Image (cartoon, rainbow, N blue to C red):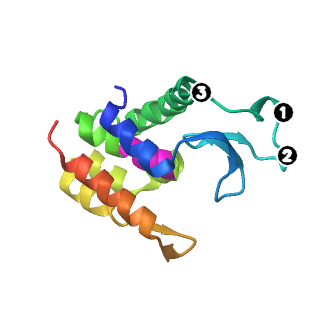
Amino acid sequence: MNTSEKGITLIKYFEGVHATPYICPAGYYTIGVGHLISRDAELPIEWDRVLSPGEIDDLLRKDLRRFELGVLRMLGTVQPTQSEFDALVSFSFNLGLGCFQRSTVRSAFVRGDKKRAGEVLLKYCYAGGRRLKGLIRRRLAEHALFMTQG
């Protein structure tokens, strides 16, 4: 299963699309759509350039594949709809697969309580102990996608 264009659009909107390297909120060099370049204090020379839209999309597809496979593995035998899958991949892309694995979103989904999974998805809007408007908006968008039939 692959992330659909709806899912990719949502991820790009909330992550942002950057053709040049920038330092993300966690303090790491990043480029494209949340692609980690380096955890070091210096930018590697090969990344000191402007990426084309095609290069950005290629990097995103490569990065998404890890999250797609991780989400599917952690769901076990429970099959998501395309919309559920897209929302769960976006959620994992933002918070990490470890967070998804430990989340009440995943445990409710695997138990077959998809309604509850969608509801608790909305609670993951805190960073550094603070409720952030950007995360509230992202979770609302993921929830809307999750609840979409198809």
Kindly identify the residue that appears in the image at 25 percent across and 62 percent down: 119
The picture places residue 130, in percent across and down from the top left corner, at: 51, 76
Q: Quadrant of residue 47?
A: top right
Name, please, the residue furthest toward the left: 149
Element carrying mark 3:
loop
The kind of secondary structure element at disc 1 is helix
Whether residue 45 is situated above or below residue 146 in the rendered picture: above
Q: Position of residue 48 (x, y in %)?
A: 78, 35
Q: Which residue is mark 3?
A: 52
Q: Count residues near mark 2 (Cα–Cα under 10 Å), then give few for <14, some for 14-19, many for 20+.
A: few
Residue 2 in the magenta stretch? The answer is: no
Q: Quadrant of the C terminus?
A: top left
Camera sees residue 91: yes
Residue drawn at x 81%, y 42% is 43
Q: Which residue matches tag 2?
A: 42
The stretch of residues the image draws in magenta is: 88-94
Q: CA distance from mark 2 to mark 3?
A: 22 Å
- Is residue 90 covered in magenta? yes
Q: For residue 121, which quarter of the picture?
A: bottom left
Q: Nearer the viewer, residue 73 or 14?
A: 14
Question: Label 2 to label 1, Cα distance in Å?
Answer: 9 Å
Q: Nearer the viewer, residue 136 or 50?
A: 50
Other-residue count near label 3 (Cα within 10 Å), few / some / many at <14 / 14–19 / ≥20: few
Name which residue lies at 82% across and 47% down: 40
Q: Earlier in the sequence, mark 2 or mark 3?
A: 2
Q: Which residue is mark 1?
A: 45
Distance between mark 1 and mark 3 Cα atoms:
17 Å
